[in-house]
Amino acid sequence: MRIAVVGAGVVGVSTAYELACDGHEVVVYDRRSAVAEEASFACGSLLGPGYVEPALAPIGMGLRLSAHEMAWLWQRRKMPTGQSASAHARLLPLALYSRSRRETLTQALSLSFDQREGLMLLFRTAQDEALAQPHLQALRDAGVVAKPLSPTLARKLELALNTDTPLHSAAYLQEDGAGNCRQFALLLKSAAHTKGVRFQMGTTVQALQRHAPTVLRLANDPTPHQYDAVVVCTGAAAVPLLKPLGLRLPLVAVHGCSISAQIREPLNAPHSAVLDMRHRVSIARIGHRVRVAGGADMGMGHHTARSAALQTLYRVLHDWFPGAARIGSDVQEWHAEQATVLDGLPLLGASGVPGVWLNLGHGASGWALASGTARVLADCVLQRPPAIDLAGMGTDRTHTPA
Ligand SMILES: Cc1cc2nc3c(=O)[nH]c(=O)nc-3n(C[C@H](O)[C@H](O)[C@H](O)COP(=O)(O)OP(=O)(O)OC[C@H]3O[C@@H](n4cnc5c(N)ncnc54)[C@H](O)[C@@H]3O)c2cc1C
């Protein structure tokens, strides 16, 4: 088949690679000049099921919410108790599958993207630990080993953890870890290119048309481009793109941020990655840098929220790894939108419109889920039963008025 993939973040690049492995002729379109320039650029870098959760952070509100965002928040508030737990139970097999697919690709293609092994969940107080119990139980139910650690044992594994910051306990996930998402996407792009995938960068795809959904119209190009199938991997930008098809996606953009700073003293830096469960802030070693990420805010006019979120990142880094990084003018401060679906599950598989497929809305876990969702999507296109049950991940979920 001739297939167009719209969006060249880590999800679009992974999807294009998997489709090419199945022998399809694939063209990728992205409005940016390089791959992984939006949400996949400097994300938190955590990988593995220990981090994957439908609603990792409570969502803050900006001053000016659109009608779509207000409706989304309202519907989210009305969601039945237990919904988050069942979404989590559905996400974990996908996260495990994704890990295994990423490991296979990493080995087969000799990919090197600053991988580190091990993720430590940090509980500052007994209450933090108690609040995390449903998360830990869901991990155990999925067969993931999360080893409980005393503060002393935690500090033996992460030697640089600041002893001045109170630590009640920790949980250690040896098979989880961290890696550079953008680097992975760039390497996989090269591998996809070798398999014949064409990348049309700097090209904006206009809204799909109801009468011909697999004919792409590009900005500044009057020629229609006909495909057998189109896979949409554009994150939250899918809402206007798919609206003419009658698809009202329960999807909003939630804003997060990260800082990346050069390591000043390696002995003071994290060995791998930690997640402060109180502040929902991750700290990971990425090559010669430390990356700190967190925040979850909706709406425009959120500059104050953004600067408050950045200050939290600096504070949490200082709490756990003081002196680890060079904090000065060359710190990279970054923010981006993560496309988040009402119930925390991605939109994955057939859209309901013939020829149009979706792989988007991975919320705060798109890097961890990308390799698995890409393989699943490619299986669906080939009409081969996917390794993961996709129930609950379709477009048949509650729609907000757009
Ligand atoms: C602060 C922060 C921390 C995070 N930490 C983690 C983490 O630790 N672990 C984890 O697993 N995930 C994390 N995430 C989430 C993760 O970054 C995202 O889920 C993931 O990058 C989404 O990838 P994507 O390819 O779907 O989207 P993107 O990378 O945003 O790619 C979408 C692409 O579509 C293109 N596009 C959009 N519209 C059009 C159009 N009309 N025409 C052409 N191109 C178009 C865009 O240019 C973009 O390149 C974090 C996110 C943030 C913001």
Image (spheres, grey):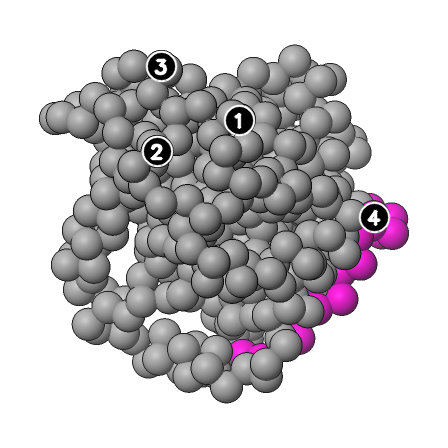
Q: Residue at x 54, y 22 (%)?
A: 115
Q: Which residue is mark 4?
A: 387
Q: Nearer the viewer, mark 1 or mark 2?
A: 2
The CB of the residue at mark 2 lies under 8 Å from ligand 1: no
Residue 83 point in image, percent of width and height: 62, 75
Q: Residue at x 69, y 58 (%)?
A: 138
Magenta stretch in the rendered image: 380-399
State yes or no: residue 39 in magenta.
no
Disc 4 to disc 3: CB gap under 8 Å: no
Q: Which residue is mark 1?
A: 157
Disc 1 to disc 3: CB gap under 8 Å: no
Q: Specify the label residue 163 is tagged with.
A: 2
Residue 337 point in image, percent of width and height: 36, 52
The Cα atoms of the two marked residues, 4 and 3, are separated by 41 Å
Specify few, some or many for label 3: CA neighbours under 10 Å numbering under 14, 14-19, or 20 or more: some
Instruction: Tell me the kind of residue under disc 2.
Output: Thr
Disc 3 to disc 2: CB gap under 8 Å: no
Instruction: Tell me the kind of residue under disc 3.
Output: Pro
Specify few, some or many for label 1: CA neighbours under 10 Å numbering under 14, 14-19, or 20 or more: some
Q: Nearer the viewer, mark 2 or mark 4?
A: 2
